[in-house]
Amino acid sequence: MSAPEQWSARQVMETYHQSVQTTYGRTPLVFVRGRGARLWDADGKEYLDWVSGGRAGNALGHCHPDVVAALKTQLDTLTFVSNDFYHPWGARLGQLLAEQTGGRKAFFCNSGAETTETALKLARKWGYNRRGAACHEIITFDRSFHGRTFGALSATGQTKFHKGFEPMVPGFHYLPWGDLDALEAAVGPQTCGVFLEPVQGEAGTYPAEPAFMQGIERICREKEILFMVDEVQTGFGRTGRFWAYEHYGVEPDVVTLAKALGGGLAIGACLAKPDCCALVPGDHGCTFGGNPLATAAGCAAIEALDRHALIANAAAQGEYLLGKFREWQARWPVISDVRGLGLMLAIEFSGAQGKTALATCLDQGLIIHGVGDSILRILPPVILTRAEADEGLRLLEAAIAGAVA
Ligand SMILES: Cc1ncc(COP(=O)(O)O)c(C=O)c1O
């Protein structure tokens, strides 16, 4: 039998269907190679990747040379020791993240959902220590997305994801997005924290209004509860600042980060202010969390952001793309909204034109995401050049022109 990388696209897809559970509605594309903002499929066709590998997973682009170099060294040095021990790369990544967050301390895990679980457990333990077991409720928001494990799913304010899996973990209270009066009314002695995405990503890219974010912080301070933000998708420079919360002038107690942190490898971190670190030995753990390979990749990825000024690039390219989207909105009334922060953008149509445009983009070699039939999500890697921005704009503009004709 030939090596899998020599299999035809059809053979790969058929083998998936035979041997892998159908938990994803996969696009029928088989990718075999990536470099920077480009992917190549099994037939050699080239694509411009405006989703960072998908779901904003790899903000540095494919096979970033700095991350690859660090990984090659690390593979020959040490890939795994458990959290029964120390190693230098975990120490250094903790330090680098502390520098990015004004001294917040990390708990390392492997995914976004695990960072959510960590934040939820930390908040419950913090509430328990301060006000007893009754103080365990966590407030989240309608349309939010925090992951697929039971705690994270229960925190997620979208009933469509709960269906068939009830009962959810108790102790979550969902509020309307943007409604500070509802928040004031909902917080009580039972509340230990509020958890939100600064830009709701999976739902269709909805940035919080500054007054909402700042109001949440004020209420959390007044009521002495934890202010927690899910930066799994928004963190690591995507919005044109290292953290999206920096756009709002707030200082959350707890911040979660995953996806881009590993430069293409699985890693997550839940960061908390030192006086909020309620989890103690025995409370929580993760065998592969913060392993030498993933943390070495994380160190290289953070240093690459800085060395190549990629956060400023994300801000500049994001502003450029949004400016063009606004021009399209003025030209085509069927575009009902364009929105976003940095390189986390969306175009919304009044009907199903999004679905048609998405199909044309894929056919023409531009990868973007859709939410329902009417929203296009655009999440290019932060290494995007102006030439790659223009190339994608040409393809997207032509696809939209065809879809609205
Ligand atoms: C804001 C947010 N939180 C959590 C998650 C879950 O991350 P993961 O898929 O790595 O578990 C996601 C994934 O899309 C996300 O966007």
Image (spheres, rainbow, N blue to C red):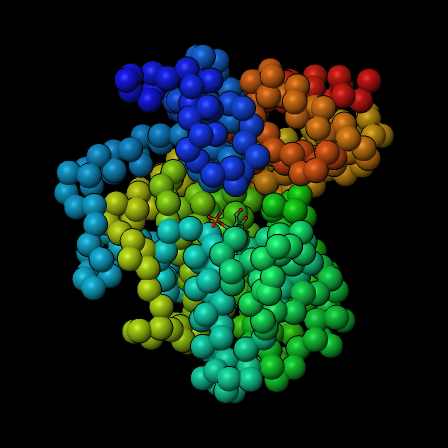
Residue furthest to the bottom: 131
The residue depicted at 47 percent of the width and 17 percent of the height is 10
Q: Is residue 363 visible?
A: yes
Which percent across, then down, holds residue 303?
34, 43
Quarter holding residue 372: top right
Quarter holding residue 102: bottom left
Which percent across, then down, holds residue 48?
52, 22
Residue 182 horizontal side relative to residue 240, left or right: right
Location of the N terminus (image quadrant):
top left
Which of 76/66 is in front? 76
Residue 357 horizontal side relative to residue 101, left or right: right
The residue depicted at 30 percent of the width and 46 percent of the height is 294
Instruction: Say how many tags the image has.
Output: 0
Residue furthest to the left: 77
Vertical order, 26 against 311 (above or below): above
Vertical order, 171 against 320 (above or below): below
Quarter holding residue 28: top right
Residue 338 horizontal side relative to residue 231, left or right: right
Residue furthest to the right: 333
Vertical order, 223 against 307 (above or below): below
Which percent across, then down, holds residue 315?
56, 39
Vertical order, 293 against 141 (above or below): above
Q: Is residue 211 visible?
A: no
Which of 256/134 is in front? 134
The residue depicted at 35 percent of the width and 41 percent of the height is 265
Location of the C terminus (image quadrant):
top right
The residue depicted at 61 percent of the width and 33 percent of the height is 369
Which percent across, then down, holds residue 157?
65, 58
